[in-house]
Image (cartoon, rainbow, N blue to C red):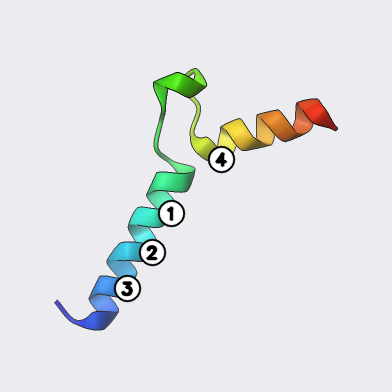
Amino acid sequence: MTLDELKTAMEDYIRYYNEERINTKRKGLTPLQYRHQTLSITI
């Protein structure tokens, strides 16, 4: 694996972890959806 491939794989994983991963503790929402929901409630 080249450094460019490693960088791309890490960026893809970070994006998945923060934007697509569904978490049961957050009522089935992704972390990004949960943050947006929380922000909209507090504003």
How far, Cα to Cα, is label 3 from label 4? 22 Å
Q: Position of residue 16 (x, y in %)?
A: 39, 48
What amino acid is found at the position of numbered circle 3 in the picture? Lys
In the image, residue 13 above or below residue 11: above
Point out the tag, 3 or 1, that comes first from the N-terminus.
Answer: 3
Inter-mark Cα distance, 2 to 4:
16 Å
Judging by the rendered image, the residue that carries numbered circle 4 is 32
For label 1, the SS is: helix
Residue count near mark 2 (Cα–Cα under 10 Å), binned few <14, some 14–19, many ≥20: few
Which quarter of the figure has residue 6?
Answer: bottom left
The secondary structure type at the circle numbered 4 is helix
Q: Which residue is mark 3?
A: 7
x and y, in percent, of residue 12 in the image? 36, 59
Say whether marks 1 and 2 touch (CB < 8 Å): yes
Q: Considering depth in this image, is 38 or 19 the residue closer to the camera? A: 38
Residue 11's mark?
A: 2
Looking at the rendering, in which quadrant would you find the C terminus? top right
Point out the tag, 2 or 4, that comes first from the N-terminus.
2
**The residue positioned farthest toward the left in the image shown:** 1
Q: Residue at x 48, y 44 (%)?
A: 19
- Please state the horizontal and vertical placement of residue 17, each as a whole percent of the image: 40, 46
Marks 3 and 1, Cα distance to the nearest angstrom?
A: 12 Å
Position above or below: 5 against 11: below
Q: Which residue is mark 1?
A: 15
**Disc 2 residue type (three-letter):** Glu
For the residues labelled 3 and 2, say whether their Cβ atoms are less than 8 Å apart.
yes
Q: Earlier in the sequence, mark 3 or mark 4?
A: 3
Type of the residue with mark 1: Arg
Residue 10 picture quarter: bottom left
Instruction: Mark 1 or mark 4: name the one nearer the start of the chain.
Output: 1
